Image: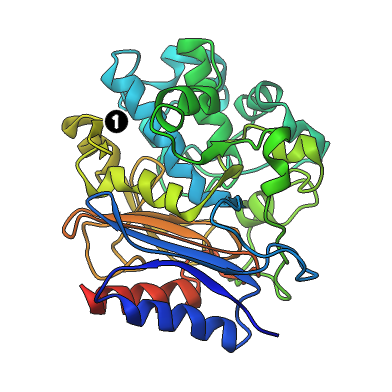
């Protein structure tokens, strides 16, 4: 099978193209895209392979891939915008906006909830997975949960619930869902091809993914990991127009890698995209400062959490400790490195079982930094 690679490579970055092509030649990819920008300008924008499992549809420059949890920092960016506009502050008690959330002693601040410290990482008791498609109903169910560990004592990744918490906070102050604010205030005016929740009219551009053959390495099982990932109701339906269109800020971000690299440029370029300030410098500092660091109760490794974005303490996203990033199901990732003014996004549709640190993304990132 011949895989066509298309796109753009600036002079000096040819080794990244060779690495990208090598992954296809070795059978590691069916379809994928990779983009890197410096100061918001593309130095690499590659795509290749196929968007379907049967290898009948070629990946195009406007193919829309689901980034899953790589979407999470986009929700944090909206909350940061609300801080800049005076509607809330990261350090406010969540109960000031959402009193119902504080039952069962969940007395946490907004930033503590966004940094996965609230203790409500998932649902232990069975419920209908279709509930995930109703953002406000599910937010009510999350608010009523008893924490699975004492809030603020440790972090435990909230793979789905994070997005519903962020969305409800946005809705409480603006009366609008977070995805709509994100679209109206960032992606639409800046012509960035990314949306949280894929409208029906764009679903013909959707990239089909192949699930991994093996489950992720979660380490020793505990109730937190089970609630977050290991039940039949831990995630929403993945197939169908309604599932794709659901405006879930934790997982339902769809776009091109060029769009995602532009968005992660916020972390690389002092809060700016395309010359427009999205977040003030002081609020960006609040967004990206360390909030809790240590062994995560859900993820099988140490994490340095900021407000919904991972600090690069473990150097998952290149060598700089100043980098901010996040990874998503199957191997996607995005990050911004302010020391190099560099932002990067990678997305495959042949999913690996990596939660963070997909080997293909790491190989491309290593070669990219060698070129800088």
Within the image, what quadrant is residue 319 found in? bottom left
For the question of whether residue 128 can be seen, the reply is yes
In which quadrant will I find the N terminus?
bottom right
Where 294 falls versus 279 (above or below)?
Answer: below
In which quadrant will I find the C terminus?
bottom left
For the question of whether residue 106 can be seen, the reply is no
Counting from the top left corner in percent of width and height, residue 204 is at 73, 45
In depth, the one of 144 and 341 nearer the eye is: 341
Counting from the top left corner in percent of width and height, residue 246 is at 69, 33
Answer left or right for 369 relative to 205.
left
Q: Residue at x 40, y 75 (%)?
A: 364
Counting from the top left corner in percent of width and height, residue 258 is at 43, 52
Within the image, what quadrant is residue 153 found in? top left
Label 1 environment density (alpha carbons within 10 Å; few <14, some 14–19, many ≥20):
many
Where 270 falls versus 247 (above or below)?
Answer: below
Dot 1 lies on which element? loop
Answer left or right for 13 relative to 172.
left
Number of marks: 1
Q: Residue at x 62, y 62 (%)?
A: 59
User: Which residue position holds label 1?
Assistant: 278
Counting from the top left corner in percent of width and height, residue 297 is at 51, 56
Answer left or right for 30 relative to 299.
right
As drawn, which residue projects farthest toward the bottom?
26
Q: Residue at x 80, y 70 (%)?
A: 54
Chosen colour scheme? rainbow
Q: Residue at x 51, y 64 (%)?
A: 33
């Amino acid at each position: 099978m011949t895989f066509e690679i298309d796109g753009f490579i600036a002079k000096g970055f040819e080794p990244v193209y060779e690495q990208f092509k090598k992954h296809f030649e070795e059978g590691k990819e069916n379809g994928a895209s990779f983009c890197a920008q410096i100061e918001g300008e593309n130095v690499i924008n590659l795509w290749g392979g196929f968007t379907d499992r049967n290898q009948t549809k070629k990946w195009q420059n406007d193919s829309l891939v689901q980034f899953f949890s790589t979407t999470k920092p986009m929700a944090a960016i909206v909350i940061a915008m609300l801080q800049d506009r005076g509607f809330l502050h990261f350090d406010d008690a969540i109960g000031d906006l959402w009193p119902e959330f504080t039952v069962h002693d969940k007395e946490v601040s907004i930033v503590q909830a966004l940094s996965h410290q609230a203790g409500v990482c998932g649902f232990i008791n069975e419920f209908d997975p279709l509930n995930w498609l109703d953002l406000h109903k599910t937010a009510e169910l999350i608010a009523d949960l008893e924490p699975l560990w004492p809030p603020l004592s440790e972090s435990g990744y909230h793979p789905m619930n994070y997005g519903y918490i962020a969305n409800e906070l946005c809705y409480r102050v603006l009366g609008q869902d977070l995805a709509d604010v994100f679209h109206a205030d960032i992606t639409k005016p800046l012509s960035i091809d990314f949306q949280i929740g894929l409208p029906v009219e764009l679903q013909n551009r959707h990239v089909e993914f192949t699930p991994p053959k093996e489950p992720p390495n979660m380490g020793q099982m505990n109730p937190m990991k089970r609630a977050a990932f290991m039940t039949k109701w831990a995630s929403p339906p993945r197939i169908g127009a309604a599932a794709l269109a659901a405006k879930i800020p934790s997982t339902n971000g769809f776009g091109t890698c060029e769009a995602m690299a532009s968005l992660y440029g916020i972390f690389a370029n002092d809060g700016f995209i395309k010359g427009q300030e999205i977040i003030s410098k002081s609020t960006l500092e609040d967004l990206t400062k360390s909030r809790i660091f240590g062994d995560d109760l859900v993820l099988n490794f140490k994490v340095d959490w900021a407000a919904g974005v991972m600090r690069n303490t473990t150097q998952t996203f290149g060598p700089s400790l100043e980098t901010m990033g996040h990874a998503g199901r199957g191997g996607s990732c995005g990050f911004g490195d302010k020391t190099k003014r560099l932002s990067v996004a990678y997305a495959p549709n042949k999913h690996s079982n990596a939660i963070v640190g997909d080997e293909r993304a790491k190989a491309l990132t290593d070669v990219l930094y060698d070129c800088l």
